[in-house]
Image (cartoon, rainbow, N blue to C red):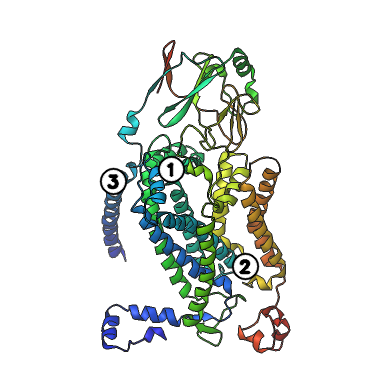
Amino acid sequence: MDKPEKKGNRRDFIFTASYTVGAIGIGATIWPLIDQMNPDSSVKALASTEVDISQIEPGKSVTVLWRGKPVFIKRRTQEEIAEAQSVSLDDLPHPEKDQDRVKNPEWLVMLGICTHLGCVPLSDKGEYNGWFCPCHGSHYDTSGRIRKGPAPTNMEIPKYAFVDDNTIKIG
Amino acid sequence: MSENYVPSSKFGKWFNDRLPLLTLSKHLTDYPTPKNLNYWWTFGGILTFCLISQIITGIVLGMHYVAHADMAFNSIEHIMRDVNYGWLIRYIHSNGASMFFLAVYIHIFRSLFYGSYRSPREIIWILGMLIYLLMMATAFMGYVLPWGQMSFWGATVITNLFSAIPLVGESIVTWLWGGYSVDNPTLTRFFSLHYLFPFLILGLVVLHIWALHVPGNNNPIGIDIKKPSKDTVPFHPYITIKDLFALLIFMIIFSGFIFFAPNILGHSDNYIEANPLVTPKHIVPEWYLLPFYAILRAVPDKLGGVVLMLGSIFILMALPWLDSSKVRSTVFRPLYKKFFWLLVIDVLALGYVGAMPAEGLYLLIARVGTIYYFAHFLIVLPVLSRIEKTEPVPLSISEPVLGGMLKPEMARSDRKDV
């Protein structure tokens, strides 16, 4: 019995080696077919947008398109800032300080996308005077933080910078 | 029997020896079918018609449609206004999807009622469920192609379901989109896959029918029968003519939609071109997905909602092993019969609240309905199938008839004599 088993082991090695090489080959062939579906270079190239904010009155907001997604730029009133800053972190499903969500408390810049399933929330609606998503009923406060409803997290803050007093560069 | 079939013509024999297509066609015409099949059994044929109809009209629409975010919406209007009979072909295709789902739901509930998913037909059932899943994917992608508001936001919400997956969710969604939002790359790939999937469905349908022809059809009293015997009739002409009659009735209803209410099952918001900045006030999926949508919204947690929604479909695949009753047909399960109809009402109610805003009483109904849906399959069915005292089942399809009984349900007194 010993001899054939030994032979079998040599054969097993060849089998395992062949399967491994085959699997790597198949994987390497399939990867381009999968990766072609990821964002292409032309999509990635549209990475930043500059917005003129000089015309926005306090309490008003504009919505701009960045990477196909709406970005809310809201010039908040003093009451809205005070309301956002006074909330206790314990009351938040996704605790984040308002100060950490803005570069200048007057300007809230965030992705206008409900973190539940991607609808665009309506501004100045809902139980927390911020945003309300009509799709599945998520309520956001004046800092865009989730307060009530199925959305798991606060609305996302994109990468942005103040180029000068009147211009924001998103991306 | 068809396996030993020899064609009568010399050419036929020559051909059949090389490719036994004539043997196959003989098998299909002679195929012994239970003689007590009722009209609920005609939906297999109706569904085959639906699939072929969708493929033909779809290929024609593909000749005129332009899969590009800037042109798709206008190309649909071009089909509706300029293309000869374009309006007709598009309405057949869009209403055909609804009719397809109507028929498939009747077909599925037929199987549920008569225990057609039970051994030895588990594989037929699972193949059917895979077909159903592919149908939903195909219908969803097809609904995106007109690039209206509902198309765009439906696509956004459904693809975002994947973002509930921990860790890799966001990357998967970006991969599905081919960008950072639903946009042109999403549209073109959906068109490509929407064209492919019906042929995958067709392939699965062939396997579904093949698997059916191994044990043969289940029947309303759910007993195993000898084939062929006096309990069976040949498929042709007995079943073909019955299927054809049912198909005609079905096509009359289908035509009613196409010619008199072509948009009643659609949503007017989809005649507004896609706008990534504005979500419609009230977004709803097509009617055939509403019960699942209600389950999704009934759960106040993102991942939980997605898991329950997918679970409500996948739980059906386990059905053959959840039901362990000795009797297949619900005809002989008086208690389970009540729960079966409760399930039907439950699914219809979920469909109704799925179309309503997710608040107040609607939300409560959705939650109760979701709980019952899962309780039905995970508690009621397994428990009842073990403890319920079923009614006696006739030994053959002919028995209740020859014994002078009006209905198979009344055959119980006969049983002891046998």
Residue B178 in percent (x, y) is at 37, 39
| Type of amino acid at the residue the image marks with label 2 | Phe
Residue at the spot of label 3 = A28
* Callout 2 crowding tier (Cα within 10 Å): few <14, some 14–19, many ≥20: many
Q: Secondary structure at mark 1?
A: loop
Whole-number angstrom distance, CA of label 1 to CA of label 3: 35 Å
Whole-number angstrom distance, CA of label 2 to CA of label 1: 39 Å
Q: Nearer the viewer, residue B392 or A41?
A: A41
Between marks 3 and 2 in the image, the one whose residue lies nearer the viewer: 2
User: Left of B371 or right of it: where is B241?
Assistant: left
Q: Can see residue A119?
A: yes
| Type of amino acid at the residue the image marks with label 3 | Ala
Q: Quadrant of the N terminus of chain B?
A: bottom left
**Residue at x-position 63% and y-position 45%:** B356
* Callout 3 crowding tier (Cα within 10 Å): few <14, some 14–19, many ≥20: few
Residue B230 in percent (x, y) is at 55, 88
Q: Which mark is residue B113?
A: 2
| Type of amino acid at the residue the image marks with label 1 | Trp
Chain letter behind tag 2: B
Q: Which mark is residue B77?
A: none
Between marks 2 and 1 in the image, the one whose residue lies nearer the viewer: 1
Q: Secondary structure at mark 2?
A: helix
Q: Nearer the viewer, residue B60 or B301?
A: B60
Q: Are marks 2 and 1 in contact (CB under 8 Å)?
A: no
Residue at the spot of label 1 = B147
Q: Secondary structure at mark 3?
A: helix
User: Left of A71 or right of it: where is A17?
Assistant: left
Residue B255 in percent (x, y) is at 51, 62
